[in-house]
Image (cartoon, rainbow, N blue to C red):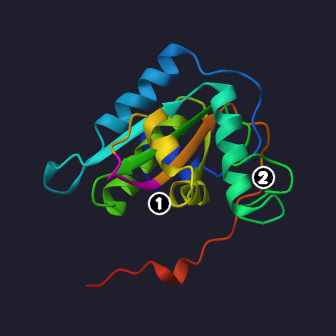
Amino acid sequence: MIIKNEVTNAILSRQTIREYKDIPLNDDELETLMKAALLAPSGRNGQPCHVRFITDKSMLEEINHDFKEFVGYDTPAYTRAEKNPVYHNAPVMAMIFSENGSKMDAGIMVENIAICAKGIGLESVIIASVGALFDGPDSLKWKNRLNIPENYVFDIAISVGHGDEKPEPKPREISRIQIVK
């Protein structure tokens, strides 16, 4: 039997949401997400990740423009690319960077943000494709605008907001989880 509590409910009910209402996050919601990112565990407590929570809609639109210019407007670089911007119209996109490309620590941080978001009534979509922007000609422009050191690499991003869809849960491959006694 699954043990139910606020944490397990958030984990077990979280889904990827790609449609968002045009409602900004309030200061308490944003501060809570930032605290969840800050308190994410990291290997040997190295805390290598730098995260930027972008709430400026014009900046999000410019990121989308530069990203699409680099990868191509007709490139299916992410789910629903034909109709959604790379940030999926969410009011916040958090981008995580690290000096040595610490994908493990960034993955832990992004999961903290995703579970925290669900726990406070928000939805999220984890995004890797926008990282192409930091492989292209506008990489330095965006690192400067986001106050990210030049030698840091993009690890992962997450968009968060008030969801505007309720998709059916996707099937999971249960055989991939086993107990070894």
Q: Nearer the viewer, residue 26 or 152?
A: 152
SS state under label 2? loop
Q: Which residues are magenta?
A: 150-155
For this orientation, the residue located farthest to the left is 44
Q: Which residue is labeled 1 in the image?
A: 1
Label 1 packing within 10 angstroms: few (<14), some (14-19), many (20+): few
Residue at point 56% right, 49% down?
A: 138
Q: CA distance from mark 1 to mark 2?
A: 25 Å
Q: Amino acid at mark 1?
A: Met
Q: Amino acid at mark 2?
A: Pro
Vertical side of 39 occupied by 107: above or below:
below
The location of residue 101, given as percent across then percent down, is 34, 61
The location of residue 49, given as percent across then percent down, is 31, 46
Q: Nearer the viewer, residue 161 or 6?
A: 161
Taking the image as shown, residue 98 lies to the left or right of residue 6, namely left
Residue 45 shown in magenta: no
Residue 152 shown in magenta: yes
Which numbered dot is residue 20? none
Q: Nearer the viewer, residue 15 or 70?
A: 70
The location of residue 48, given as percent across then percent down, is 25, 49
Quarter of the image that includes the C terminus: bottom left
Q: Which residue is labeled 2 in the image?
A: 167
Q: Specify the quadrant of the image occupied by residue 23.
A: top right
For this orientation, the residue located farthest to the front is 137
The location of residue 45, given as percent across then percent down, is 16, 49
Vertical side of 58 occupied by 176: above or below:
below
